[in-house]
Image (spheres, rainbow, N blue to C red):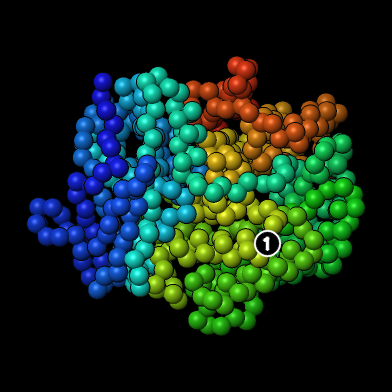
């Protein structure tokens, strides 16, 4: 019986780079320029990086051993999953970047390697037949970080299953070890979000009409459903090829008094969620708080105290209107300039355009995490959805995370590639946060039956269950089924999991603890996969 490599021991080799030194390889017989400690605890290990004479950039740790028996490897992504950031199992490839954690199957056993959530660096693994490597990106944007004191960069964890034990069960067990303090919604989150039928063309009247339709779809649920108002409510929003999708975060003339809108929705019997983009504005702000000017406005530097103060003020204002949930969006692309942030392309350089941050003493990972903390602190006890955020840094801070890239009200292929593929992250559900695979979008361009299947899947697995529904588009039998789905979501008893987790990255078969099986055909609409594809058609 082959054995997996033990990483809860001192690394066999360490390499590093600072602002003035490239990686020093073992054959050069030079010491690693990055000073660190690998402190082995009870069941995990801490990687502590010390200040250097030069800003620290990277640390690479290597454990050698025999992995020739490994058959397949699962790798996650930095951010949302989808076409350019697929979540899947593949054969061994030593150059493949595996963000945060990975699962390995070999000799009828599963092993998992990872770093705990809330790390102060970007960490990825690489697996080859001769060993396993952990790479820590400690940069401050384009440059190294000027550490002022020792930094707990990350905490390393490993789990090994028994012979024949299901790989999905091992992944769930491992996920619970990766997040010490998950944040989970107090009540189930289900209802509607109006993005995928209206695409920002909304008003007070439209939202109130949507709310009435929502309540006809949910019936007498124990928990109130959500009416989530997405992009399009804010002042200065423009449309067209060069649309401006940013602040300031006050209502436009189509909404007027947002507190009154929220109160009207509450009176009808629904909760209210509101979307916003924290870092893009056209307001007058201090010059040194501007990271760059893009997308028709100014992108605020998240490392600057003014930015944190302003974002918190915006969140508190939105909360003061009485909303029950806040969805924040676009922070990853605004901070890094990269969309999508894929594992393969941006493992070392996480920013475009040589972005330089105001505070050079914190790693980029820490700066991003501190922004999330500020948003949640201002939001207080209400739920926050992180969209276009870094999953491993969101865990333990926000209660809901958008795990997939955008679904679509234009064609189901996007929903399959992004939404259904993102369900490969189901082992993280309620171990990190509540998983949001994005909306089932009901329009006259997308088959309703397949979207009802997708929405049902969200409910039976206990994920966030949201739909975008064009008002009055559903037929009587479709209305009956969507009521049943929302009632399942309301009960919050979703206990179906992925069957044959390592066989299909567009998971189609699910099983509950009693052995009941649900099987879906995600390929029936296009009789396979739609090959010629644009997001809007």
Q: Please state the horizontal and vertical placement of residue 282, each as a whole percent of the image.
A: 63, 75
Farthest residue toward the front?
A: 42
- The vertical placement of 368 against 132, above or below, is below
Q: Residue at x 68, y 61 (%)?
A: 380
Q: Is residue 329 left or right of residue 266?
A: left
Q: Which residue is mark 1?
A: 379
Q: Quadrant of residue 423?
A: top right
Q: Residue at x 27, y 57 (%)?
A: 37
Along the line of sight, which residue is nearer the eye, 359 or 355?
359
Q: Quadrant of residue 297?
A: bottom right
Q: Quadrant of the N terminus?
A: top left
- The vertical placement of 249 against 75, above or below, is below
Along the line of sight, which residue is nearer the eye, 300 or 407?
300
Q: Please state the horizontal and vertical placement of residue 484, each as a whole percent of the image.
A: 79, 29
Q: Please state the horizontal and vertical placement of residue 3, each as a whole percent of the image.
A: 27, 28
Residue 537 makes an appearance in the image? no
Q: Secondary structure at mark 1?
A: helix
Determine crowd level at label 1: few under 14, some 14-19, many 20+ residues with C-alpha closer than 10 A: many
């Amino acid at each position: 019986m082959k054995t997996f490599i033990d990483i809860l021991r001192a690394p066999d080799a360490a390499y590093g780079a600072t602002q003035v030194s490239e990686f020093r390889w073992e054959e050069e017989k030079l010491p690693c320029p990055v000073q660190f400690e690998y402190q082995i605890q009870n069941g995990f290990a801490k990687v502590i990086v010390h200040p250097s004479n030069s800003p620290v950039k990277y640390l690479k740790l290597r454990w050698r051993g025999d992995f020739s028996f490994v058959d397949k490897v699962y790798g996650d992504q930095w951010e949302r999953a989808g076409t350019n950031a697929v979540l899947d199992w593949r054969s061994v490839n030593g150059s493949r970047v595996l963000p945060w954690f990975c699962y390995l199957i070999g000799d009828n056993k599963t092993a998992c390697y990872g770093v705990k959530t809330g790390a102060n660096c970007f960490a990825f693994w690489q697996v080859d037949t001769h060993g396993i490597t952990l790479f820590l990106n400690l940069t401050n944007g384009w440059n190294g970080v000027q550490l002022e004191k020792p930094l707990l960069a990350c905490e390393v964890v490993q789990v090994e299953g028994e012979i024949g034990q299901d790989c999905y069960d091992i992944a769930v067990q491992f996920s619970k070890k990766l997040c010490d303090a998950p944040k989970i919604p107090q009540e189930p989150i289900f209802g509607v979000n109006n993005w995928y039928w209206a695409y920002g063309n909304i008003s007070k009247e439209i939202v109130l009409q949507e709310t009435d339709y929502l309540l006809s779809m949910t019936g007498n649920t124990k928990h109130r459903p959500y009416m989530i108002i997405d992009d399009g409510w804010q002042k200065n929003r423009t449309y067209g090829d060069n649309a401006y999708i940013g602040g300031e975060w006050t209502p436009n003339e189509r909404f007027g008094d947002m507190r009154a809108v929220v109160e009207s929705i509450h009176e009808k019997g629904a909760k209210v969620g509101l979307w916003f983009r924290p870092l893009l504005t056209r307001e007058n702000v201090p010059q040194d708080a501007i990271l760059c000017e893009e997308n028709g406005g100014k992108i605020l530097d998240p490392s600057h105290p003014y930015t944190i103060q302003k974002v918190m003020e915006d969140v508190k204002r939105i909360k003061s209107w009485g909303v029950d949930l806040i969805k924040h969006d676009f922070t990853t692309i605004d901070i890094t300039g990269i969309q999508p942030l894929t594992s393969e392309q941006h493992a070392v350089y996480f920013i475009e355009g040589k972005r330089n941050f105001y505070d050079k003493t914190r790693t980029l990972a820490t700066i991003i995490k501190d922004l999330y903390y500020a948003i949640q602190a201002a939001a207080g006890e209400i739920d926050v959805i992180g969209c276009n955020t870094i999953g491993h840094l969101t865990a333990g801070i926000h209660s809901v995370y958008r795990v997939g890239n955008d679904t679509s009200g234009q064609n189901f292929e996007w929903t399959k590639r992004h939404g259904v593929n993102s369900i490969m992250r189901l082992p993280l559900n309620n171990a990190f946060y509540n998983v949001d695979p994005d909306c089932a979008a009901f329009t006259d361009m997308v088959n309703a039956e397949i979207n009802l299947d997708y929405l049902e899947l969200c409910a039976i697995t206990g994920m966030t269950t949201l739909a975008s529904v064009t008002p009055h588009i559903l037929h009587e039998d479709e209305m009956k089924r969507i009521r049943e789905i929302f009632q399942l979501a309301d009960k919050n008893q979703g206990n179906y999991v992925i069957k044959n987790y390592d066989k299909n990255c567009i998971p189609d078969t699910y099983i509950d603890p009693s052995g009941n099986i649900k099987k879906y055909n995600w390929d029936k609409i296009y009789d396979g996969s739609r090959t010629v594809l644009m997001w809007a058609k």
